[in-house]
Image: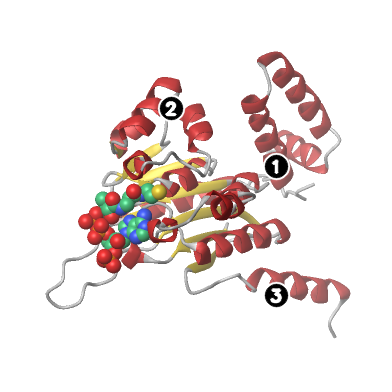
Amino acid sequence: METGDDIKKKQRFSQIMNTPESDVMKVELHPISEEEDLGFFACMTIDRPDKLNALNADVMASLKAVCAWMEASEEVRVLVVTGAQPNQPPEGKRAKPHAFVAGADITEFAGAGSEVIRKRFTNNAVEALWNLNKPTIAMVDGFALGGGCEVACSCDIRIASDRSTFGTPEINLGLIPGYGATQRLERLVGYGKAHEMIMTGDMVPAEEARRIGLVNHVVAPEDLQETVFAMAKRIGSKSSHALRVGKETVRAALDEGLTDGVEIEAIAFAGLFDSEDKEIGVQAFINRTTPEWQHE
Ligand code: COA
């Protein structure tokens, strides 16, 4: 006989399992822990490897759908964002290079005027990713150019393979970045370096990207997934409530001055003292047990 709890659990599970996949987007769920029921992290793969995972209208619509699904799926605690690996090339053809995302789909720019582009870029999917209230990690293996660099900059953390390259080459098309890099790249690498990247369009190799603060970690390609997934699990095992408050509060550093930002932190920090998870975490420390978060 099914209890109310069983039914609720089933409903929650079917919502999670109903991942918003499409022809250009794969979404895989992975457990946070093999031993305990701690929920999942999702790995979203932009899947147009023959076009170096360029962001066309279908990808952007799918990315928005994934963000909405992530917001609604309580049990999915962290999002990993990546690009598909190259396909095996046809006989006699050269293999396509590894890419996270090689930018907006340039073919969709041909003939487009400001009206069309303003509509397409207002409330776009990169903003939805940026505004997601859960932790996000970009797993970058290969080219992260233009919109690809911007998707990475819209994640909270970036981890790249040592064969990756970052850049904002829009200047070579007579353009500037349109998915937020003039703002978010500037915050990550600083005023001078952002100008250099945007004005020259030059590519920045992974190790230099790490040195200038664009990337958190650089690892060998064969270690990339393990490194990223381990971090997703580590973050996913924390209180989702505390993570959400932490993300919102760090964001305040971008929009507010130091004095106001510290004030916002003080309010957020004190607010956490009314949360269930704070008492669970503190008691677990005192009793030397593992906290069982309620995520509230
Ligand atoms: N939009 C649409 N298609 C793209 C693309 C983009 N941003 N980037 C790559 N592609 C396509 C290519 O047209 C090519 O398609 P095809 O095989 O059907 O002709 C395929 O992806 C492979 O790219 P290719 O240029 O052949 O690979 P490469 O190894 O010679 O060069 C890059 C790799 C990344 C240097 C090159 O593809 C490039 O400069 N891409 C555009 C980067 C850019 O300007 N991004 C910002 C856009 S706003």
Does the CB distance between marks 2 and 3 fall below 8 Å?
A: no
Q: Which mark is residue 189?
A: 2
Measure how far apart labels 3 and 1 are at the Cα level. 24 Å
Disc 3 residue type (three-letter): Ser
Q: Which mark is residue 136?
A: none
Q: Quadrant of residue 275?
A: top right
Where residue 292 appears, as percent x and y from the top left, is 72, 50
Disc 1 residue type (three-letter): Arg
Disc 2 crowd, CA 10 A, few/some/many (<14, 14-19, 20+): some
Measure how far apart labels 2 and 1 are at the Cα level. 24 Å
State the residue position of label 3. Answer: 14
Disc 3 crowd, CA 10 A, few/some/many (<14, 14-19, 20+): few
Image depth: mark 2 or mark 1 in front: 2
| Secondary structure of residue under mark 1 | helix
* Residue drawn 76% across the image and 24% down it: 264
Disc 2 residue type (three-letter): Val
Where residue 233 appears, as percent x and y from the top left, is 54, 51
Q: Please identify the residue farthest to the top as the structure is shown.
A: 259
